[in-house]
Image (spheres, helix red, strand yellow):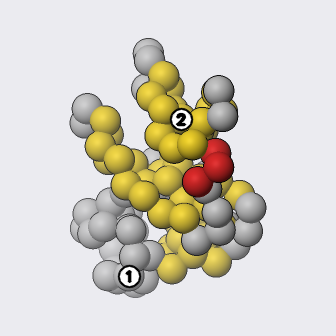
Amino acid sequence: MRYFALEKLINLHDGYRKTFKIDDHHLLLVQEEGERFLVESFCPHREHSLIDATIFGDTITCPHHTYQFNLSSGALLASTEEPCRGLRVYSLVEEAREVGVVL
């Protein structure tokens, strides 16, 4: 396992969204209402990008089929077609004025 720096803390703000590809991991870093979340960047339903998803509180809604997931746990909250697995979530690590992930 190895630490990967993603962003400097000073650059994070509410509304921040950025995708990262590290090896086989496609990640989406977001900050909303002072909370930071790191999740997979594609919806597990049909693999649509979540970069333009609606985020309200700790719920992210895929813009393609409006599937909803909890940003903290990854749990599927609502589906419009067949159910799918939950969203993969990753723990953020703050180190040396940066936020990153251990993969």
Dot 2 or dot 1: first in sequence order is: 1
| 102 is higher (above) or lower (below) than 77 | above
Please say whether residue 34 is visible from this viewpoint: yes
Mark 2 touching mark 1, by CB under 8 A? Answer: no
- Please name the amino acid that badge 1 sits on: Pro
Whether residue 31 sits left or right of residue 89 in the image: it is: right
Measured from the top left, where is residue 61 in percent x and y? 49, 76
Residue at image location 57% in from the left, 43% down from the top:
8
User: Which residue was labeled with disc 2?
Assistant: 100
Q: Residues within 10 Å of mark 2 (few under 14, many from 20)?
A: many
Q: Is 65 situated left or right of 47 in this image? A: right
For the residues labelled 2 and 1, the Cα–Cα distance comes to 26 Å
Q: Residues within 10 Å of mark 1 (few under 14, many from 20)?
A: some
In the picture of the structure, the residue carrying the numbered disc 1 is 63
**Residue 99 versus residue 85: which sits nearer the camera?**
99
Residue drawn at x 42%, y 58% is 18
Q: Residue lying at the far top in this picture: please name it.
A: 1
Total residue callouts: 2
Q: Quadrant of residue 55?
A: bottom right
Question: Could you say whether the residue bearing mark 2 is in a helix, strand or loop?
Answer: strand
